[in-house]
Image (spheres, rainbow, N blue to C red):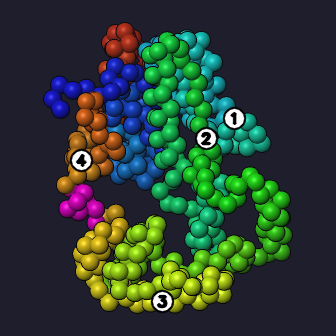
Amino acid sequence: MDGLTGALEGVRVLDCTQIIAGPLSASLLSEMGADVVKVEPIEGEPWRLQAELIPKESRNFLQQNRGKRGIAIDLKHADAQPVRETLIRWADVLIANYRPGVAEELKVDYESARAINPQIIYCENTAFGKEGPYAKRRGYDIIAQAISGVATSNPNVLDDIPQIVAFAPADVMTGIAMAWAITGALYHKQKTGQGQAINTALLHTALFMQAGAREIRAFDTEARHARVEKLHEMQRAGATMDDVYQWRRSSQPELTGNIYYRCYQTADGYIAIGCLGPGPRAKLREALQIEDPRYEPGFESTPENLVRAGNEMRELCEGLFKQKTNDEWLALLDSFGIACGPMKFVDELWEDEHVAANKYFTEYEHPLLGPIAAPSPIVRMSKTPTRIQRASPTLGEHNDQLLGELGYDAAQIAALRDAGAIR
């Protein structure tokens, strides 16, 4: 890959974002070669200060902000106004995800930005969207999961409270969507010379991830309204979440003994199998040397028969899988071409042979923390390779370098620092 450059080489991105979705999107652009400058308040953005490893450096900040240069500046300071305007003129892309009203206050909203740079591509992420009763609320991934139904989509309950998905799926998927949209906007700009505004929302992403959920079926409006009213009635009556889940299960078609797409306990661990379609399911029965009456000619598919046969098959398979180790099952299932894999903890993957063979982790240097091992870029391109340009910036690390590139001399930079406009 010597001599090859990233697909976004020469693209300049001004990253005025915090926490996960926005910073992640900008980091993804940097891995495609973009020059990304992260703008932070003088005290540092909140994610830098969350569960610090050392002062002003946290594990989550390192991951979502790698590849960028950083400037720490007080955008509210009068002396910072010319710097802000120069940065906007410098940028091809401006990304923002402040709480409602803050971008306008800091003059980094779309209207302010395009008044300075008419061709700017402006990508703004909000929690809930720019319209409607929630628009002015502050929000995070946990709120999007709660409102969207992600938190109640599976019966994961602790002390009768639905639990969220831990890895912040609305944030992560929104960050990927933002980077995807920005690359599309850059292509449009290349063809037309026009910038544009892009809007994303955590709530919208969370709803999109559940596109197949039964509640989204528009053709069943009356039944859906009845279900919602029943849920509200149960909540008003003080029903527990276990009661709600039991009612939801009873009001849906019975899941009768799923043996083909699930996780099993083995003699020394757990294994996942996936058999979708008649062919793979037949292979699993062959591998296990079992017969499933539900696939036999003449089986009467009454609800009672399906429940009985399904429960019998589930109990049979659960007992069979406990008789062999993970390695023994993997070898057998592989010989039949059945999709399978062991269940692992994240910590195990750092030394996993397969992960190492595919170079899914990489190492790079942080100026304060030294060598860092982290996931490598999630896409690989043969002609325009992706790479981690650098570690996440320390707070204000590139102030002097960036301001120098923008035309400020040493005396002017010192004056900004003395005035408290930059760190």
Q: Are marks 2 and 1 in contact (CB under 8 Å)?
A: yes
* Mark drawn on residue 315: 3
Residue 56, quarter of picture: top left
The x, y position of residue 20, in whole percent, is 48, 44
Residue closer to the observer: 306 or 398: 306
Which residue occupies 57% across, 62% down? 164
Q: Are marks 4 and 3 in contact (CB under 8 Å)?
A: no
Query: Horizontally, is 96 left or right of 203 in the view?
Result: left
Which residue occupies 35% across, 86% down? 289
Residue closer to the observer: 54 or 102: 102
- Residue ID for mark 4: 362
Q: Residues within 10 Å of mark 3 (few under 14, many from 20)?
A: few
Which residue occupies 50% across, 39% down? 177
* Mark drawn on residue 130: 1
Quarter holding the C terminus is top left
Going from N to C along the chain, the mark reached first, 4 or 1, is 1
Query: Horizontally, is 289 left or right of 50 in the view?
Result: left
- Residue ID for mark 2: 201
